[in-house]
Image: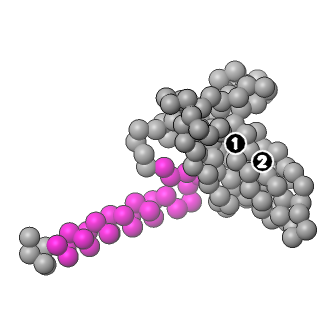
Amino acid sequence: MKRREAIKITALATLGMAVSAEACVGKQTCQTDTSKNRIMMKPKDAKNLTKGELKHTPQITLGSKDANGYTLVEITVGQGGIIHPSTKGHWIDFISLYVDKKLVGTTELEAEISRGAAAFRVKLDGAKYITSNAGCNLHGIWTSTIEL
């Protein structure tokens, strides 16, 4: 392969990555792993969740505020005493936290050795709501939002 062709191919690959990254800006999640279900899921009846919906819905708990003004935000996947499993074939692979639509952080989790839980310390002064997304490798991305 000639040097000019190699440079051209590298430039095209870089451009492709930049376009792909640009397509993710502003979206609630942008996972590109096609082996995982990345469909945004919604419960059939938000006031009466089924056991499967309870198992996948993130629970957001606010803790104390530290001396520097950061509030502890804990996220556990599963509600109503139903905890999401973490097995080789079925687990929570990521948890993301947004404050007023701004991504604060994302935690990637591994099957079997981690459970669907994460904690963040964030400044919530003036914030209106918190949203958490949790990705189940089989059953898609589930969302919870709390108003502050």
Snapshot quadrant of residue 102: bottom right
Instruction: Establish if 138 lies above or below 125.
Output: above
Q: Residue at x 76, y 23 (%)?
A: 48
Residue 128 percent across, percent down from the top left: 81, 57
- CB within 8 Å, label 1 to label 2: yes
Q: Amino acid at mark 1?
A: Ala
Q: CA distance from mark 1 to mark 2?
A: 7 Å
Q: Residue at x 78, y 59 (%)?
A: 121
Point out the stretch of residues depicted in magenta. 6-31
Q: Is residue 140 visible?
A: no
Q: Nearer the viewer, residue 147 or 94?
A: 94
How packed is label 2: few (under 14 Cα within 10 Å), some, or many (20 or more)? some
Q: Look at the image and say whether residue 5 sits in the magenta stretch.
A: no
Residue pushed farthest front?
Answer: 113
x, y percent for residue 42: 63, 34
Q: Is residue 14 visible?
A: yes
Q: Position of residue 30 (x, y in %)?
A: 50, 52
Which residue lies most toward the top here? 51
Residue 74 has which mark? 2
Residue on which the image places disc 1? 117
Label 2 secondary element = strand
Q: With 91 as the anchor, is 103 left or right in this view?
A: right
Q: Quadrant of the N terminus?
A: bottom left
Front position in the image: 2 or 51 = 2
- Residue at 65% over, 23% down: 52
Q: Secondary structure at mark 1?
A: strand
